[in-house]
Amino acid sequence: MCIFFRPTFSRLRIPQDFVRWFGEIPSNIIVKTNSSCNWRMTTVREGDDAYIDHGWAGFTVAHQLQVGQFLIFKKVSSFEYSVVIFDQTFTEVMTRCLYHGDVTRCVVFENHV
């Protein structure tokens, strides 16, 4: 799934094609970055639309996301998704989040769950 990042930092709309292809999205998910940060987030449904809601705003701040960047999400399991962040030149962004290791926000798992 590829989402072009837009200036809606409070939550992220999940494309309808993604929801149709994979079916129901769990209300609690883990998003894993390429820098070993794992974020717990929630999803919500509003009619035909689905959003990554609670946890997304903190993720955008911690990873210093900017308008023009884009993210590619990959489904790892029923509740886990990996994400890779790219800048405007299509170069992968490799940064640790500002909260790396803070168990209330960014959880680094020694053994993947």
Image (spheres, rainbow, N blue to C red):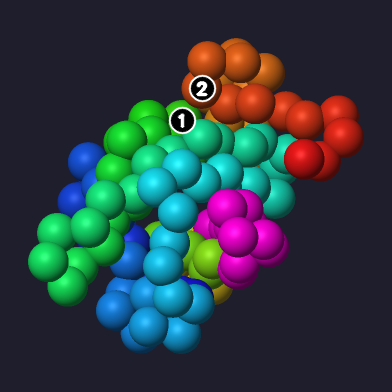
Look at mark 2 in the image and give the residue it sits on: 105
Identified by mark 2, the residue type is Arg
Residue 112 visible at all:
yes
Query: Who is closer to the viewer here, 2 or 68?
Result: 2
Q: Is residue 89 above or below residue 104?
A: below
**Contact (Cβ within 8 Å) of mark 1 with mark 2:** yes
What element does badge 2 sit on? loop
Identified by mark 1, the residue type is Ala
Look at mark 1 in the image and give the residue it sits on: 62
Q: Could you say which quadrant of the image residue 69 lies in?
A: bottom left
Q: Quadrant of the C terminus?
A: top right
Mark count: 2
Q: Main secondary structure of the magenta part?
A: strand
Q: Is residue 88 above or below residue 2?
A: above
The residue drawn where x is 71% and y is 42% is 35
Q: Nearer the viewer, mark 1 or mark 2?
A: 2
Residues rendered magenta in the picture: 74-85
